Image (tube, rainbow, N blue to C red):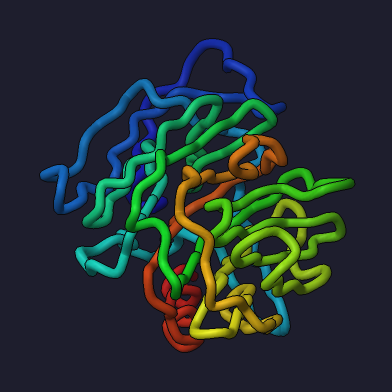
Amino acid sequence: MREHVVAVALSGLCAIHAGCGLERVGIVPYGSPRDGGARVDASAPVDAGGGASTDAGVNGVDAGPPDAGRGPACGDDPALVACYPFDGDALDHGPRANDLAVSGVSWDPSGGMALGVTSSAVVATRPELAHAETTVLAWLRVDAMPAVGRAGIVDHDGQYGLFVHPGGELRCAITIAGSGWAMAAAVIEAGRWHHVACVVEDATLRLYVDGREVATAPASTSRAPGSSALYVGENGPTGDDQLIGAIDDLQIWDKPLTGQEIAAVVRDGR
C-alpha cells in the first residue's frame, strides 16, 4: 500500500499519540469493488515516527517491508470474509463490508494502522466471521513488546485469536483460551515488520512467520457460537491487551490457505 500513500505539504506542530509524532498527509486509499474507487482523506492522522520498515528475516527468509512493490491485497473472492489494507481507513475492501469502527489509531506513512494503549478497532458480531476452517494473516510490527501478559493482533473470542507474548513469542488460539494453541518462541522482533499467519484446517492448527511454518498443534473441531465482536490490536471481548505497534494488510478467510499461498503473499510483499 505504500504506493497508494501521497504526502502533501507538512507544517505546524504534530499531535502526539502513543509516544509517536503525528503529521497530516493526504491519503489515496485503494478503491474496493464495493465503494466505487479511491477516496481522498486529506485530514487523516498518520504516525510519522518510528514507522520505517526494515527487513525481518526468520529461518533465513527475508520478509522485507510489507508494502514494497505490491498492489492491493483485496479482491472479490467470497471466501475472503474481511480484508483491511489500512491505507488511511479501516474499511473492509473485500466483498463483505465488515468495516472496523476505530478510535485512537493513526495511519503509518509506510503503510498500516498504528495502535497504542488507547486504541480500539472492532467489528460487531457478524455470522460470516465465525467459521470452522480459518486463515488469519497480516503484516505486523511490534514497537513495544509486552513485558507480561500478551498483546492482541486479532481476536474473535471463542473462534480464533492471534497474540504476541513476552520475548517475541507468537501464539494462535482456537476455541476457548487454553485449548487449541500453537506457539513459537522468539519469532517476533520488536521494531521490525513480520508477516504472521494462522491456519485452521480440519483438526490441525498451523502457525507461520515470514512465510515459514513455525508450529503446529491439534485443534478442536468444535467451535463455540460466534457471538463475539472481532477485535483488532487488542483482546476480545474485554478490549485490553493492546498492541503497541502497527498492523497492515489484515485478511481473514473462511478457508485454509496452503503454505505455498502464504509464502507467495510474503514474496509479493518484498
Quick check: 231 left or right of 1?
A: right
Between 143 and 84, the one lying in front of the other is 84
Residue 162 location in percent, x, y? 62, 59
Residue at the image position 38 percent from the left and 44 percent from the top: 87
Residue at the image position 40 percent from the left and 28 percent from the top: 25
Residue 203 location in percent, x, y? 56, 84
Q: Hey, which residue is sitting farthest left in the picture?
A: 36
Number of residue marks: 0
Q: Quadrant of residue 14?
A: top right
Residue 60 location in percent, x, y? 70, 84
Residue 129 position (above or below residue 237):
below
Residue at the image position 54 percent from the left and 78 percent from the top: 221
Between 69 and 268, the one lying in front of the other is 268
Residue 142 position (above or below residue 265):
above
Quick check: 182 left or right of 226?
A: right
Residue 31 position (above or below residue 193):
above
Q: Hey, which residue is sitting farthest top in the picture?
A: 12
Residue 43 location in percent, x, y? 36, 21
Q: Quadrant of residue 17?
A: top right
